[in-house]
Amino acid sequence: MSAKKTSCIQRSDPGKVVDLIISLKDDACSELQTKINTYLSDECDAELVFSVVVNGERAEAYIEAVGKKALEKKYKLLDCHKFIKNIKKSYQQSMLFSDFYDDVQKIVSPYLKDSGKKHVTMVPVAGKPFALVVCLVSPKVQEEHVVNYVYECFLLCWPTVKKTIILEHEKSVKHKCQQLLRVAKRLFTQVASLDSLVRLATDQGKRVVDAEFCALMIVDLDRMELVETCYTKGTDETSERRFPMDSGIAGQVIQTGIIVNTRNAAQHPAYDPNVDSRPGIDIKNSLTFPIREQQGIIGVGLLINKIGDPYFDAMDEEMALSFSVYCGVCIIHSLVYKKIHEASIRNIRGHELNMYHIEVNDAEMSKVLECKGFHNIPGLSTLHFNTRGLPQRELPCLVVKMFSDLGFIRKFNLKQSKLVRFVLQVRKSYRDVPYHNWYHAVSVAQWGYAALMNFQLVKRGYFNDLQALMYLIACLVHDLDHRGTASSFQINGETALAALYSSEGSVMERHHLGQAVSILNTEGSDILEPLPRRDYDHALLLLRDFVLATDLNNYYKKLNEYKMIASDYLIGNQIHIAALQALLMNAADFSDQIKDWSSVKKTASEVLTEFFNQDESENDREDAPIFVDPKNKTVIPELEIKFITDTVIPIYEMLGQIFPVIASATQILESHLVLWDGSKDVFIEVSPIVAGISVLLSPELDGLIEAALNERERLRLEAEALAAEEAAAAAAAAAAAAAEED
């Protein structure tokens, strides 16, 4: 029989209801329920009243108050379908107390007067997400009146009770979230060790959801297995357990990516005791959840036996999934950290190996430190001096002399022994390639040294002392460990250097810079060590800017900007200073082009040897670009003419506008262009093209070029004479024709 719900009080005593409502304040929900239970017990003359709080959306229910007694905790009910059904039907229902669920009887029985047969009237109080089923044991008033008393009571009391239930739920969520954040903080402190991380995670996982046991199983894709690291309590000893990745509830979670909450684990169709349980544990309920990262599932978490409750509830599921996110992030960070750490170790070992190969022994140091040779070489500080004719054994001493002559040893308190070791290690770091070798480094450094002297860069305010020091160092190290190939070769070949630097651009230049910094950071050759920290950091930035400026791609991109700056250079303007640094660096790098013709030919042969070697290597690779047309026999002079015209001459023209002392360099370059153009008549007879390198070194080349130029001059003069004769004949014919007309 269903009682009609009312929207006003008809049977209840309004005064008692008002007193009840007034008493419902500043209490926990269980305390509110005891007051309502007492009121209903008195009004319905019932032996006992208790309420079941039901969350229909999550299929969960609990009891927290029986009669006048507020229980010490919320007792969750293992099965609550009858209560949910009662709420959905929305009418009262009567049944024997002995027909209630066992867990309900266990909770309520201690508060009954005796164990005889008792009828219970259940009255639903609807709500979302929480609802109540009010249970009255053995009420003596008519059932219809019982329902009226309950409805009229909760007509006014339910908003307060419901808000209190929601408030306590929100407080519980907040507490759990704070607990989870503390756990996450602890986890992130252990990413350096995967074993320590997993050990901490299993311990904290139990605490987050109050579980008896927690295990984390990581996916091993190579063997298609789940791996669990087991720890011996009180020791650091570990062991490993492996399971098939497609077995048990854990396997189902791997396949579906969906959390599985079992209230009776052994009855789950996918349950496998070897995977989903552990020795010595009497499994009752379990919560199995996926551990994810961006690429997918990387593991499975297993929680066994909820402590104090018959099952893991929906909040436990949410906490487990949130916990799994932090676990996934930490595990991935730990694996990445491990890889980075291993890479760092390999890098350190590689650095040690590299430093071993460029290690300088005491004998080598003594040769330079105790050198008594004559180093006052005439013309060393001029802009057109050729260092390639100097003995190799003298070059380290000359480099040290450059630092000394410029006052850097005194200004920056450079230790002589460190400077010598630095120079010798730089020498050993250059490979034995045709052009980009130690001789080239010294040649570039000499021009930088001469530029500082002749342009008076520091004295006239173009550079400060630190810029000048780093300019000279950059000249010396700008091609360290050059392999005789360009950045494009590294990128197209997908080499290790390209993998390291291609994302930043300037692959080879960044490699040279890295090698230089490595030497500068090595004990014994750390010549910048006396600098204050701020100056040291700025020095490395200057070194970076100088070295990266030698990438011609950067030069071509800014060529128009450089031309505008050079036409109206402003001392002290930071943009202009950066442009000047780049121009001076490239001028030093290409200074071999303004030397005497014999040196220019030798330089060209070395550069072209590297060029053709690279071209040959690229032809061996599929889809590699071919830079040299085998049918063009004048490619060597054409390459040189294009390089000088498009790249070198603009550099020295711009510098000439700022420093007139270097303006004569363009005249030298133009004279070289004439000779290169004259050599076309020689190279047209050479086959194959690579043989032209031998022609460059031939002592007969100059005579052949001179003869070709003389022949061109003769042909030009003959052409002019013939043109003059034809013009005179034409003029005479015109005059004769005019005379006949007269």
Image (cartoon, rainbow, N blue to C red):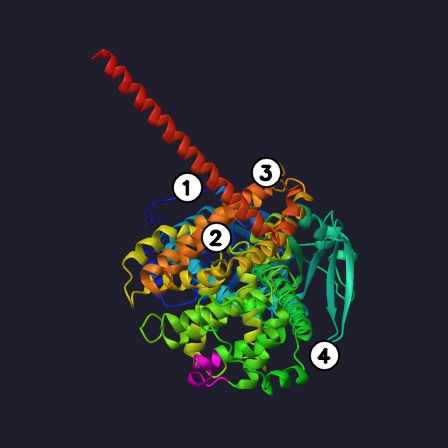
Q: Could you tell me the amino acid type at mark 4?
A: Gly
Q: Secondary structure at mark 1?
A: loop
Q: Which residue is mark 4?
A: 234
**The magenta segment:** 403-414
Q: Is residue 667 left or right of residue 374?
A: left
How far apart in space, not on screen, are marks 1 and 2 (Cα)? Answer: 113 Å
Instruction: Identify the residue at the far top of this view.
Output: 741
Say which of marks 4 and 1 sits in front: 4
Is residue 265 found inside the magenta-colored segment of the image? no
Q: Which residue is mark 1?
A: 4
Q: Secondary structure at mark 4?
A: loop
Q: Is residue 584 left or right of residue 365?
A: left
Label 4 neighbour load within 10 Å: few <14, some 14-19, many 20+: few
Of callouts 1 and 2, the N-terminal one: 1
Say which of marks 2 and 3 sits in front: 2
> Which quarter shows the C terminus?
top left
Q: Which residue is mark 2?
A: 672
Label 1 neighbour load within 10 Å: few <14, some 14-19, many 20+: few
Count all numbered tags in the image, as a single digit.
4
Residue 63 in percent (x, y) is at 54, 60
Q: Is residue 266 visible?
A: yes
Q: Is residue 127 visible?
A: no
Q: Which numbered dot is residue 632? A: 3
Q: Could you tell me the amino acid type at mark 3?
A: Asn
Q: Residue at x 44, y 86 (%)?
A: 410
Q: Residue at x 40, y 58 (%)?
A: 652
Foreground residue among 98 and 496: 496
Residue 137 in percent (x, y) is at 54, 56
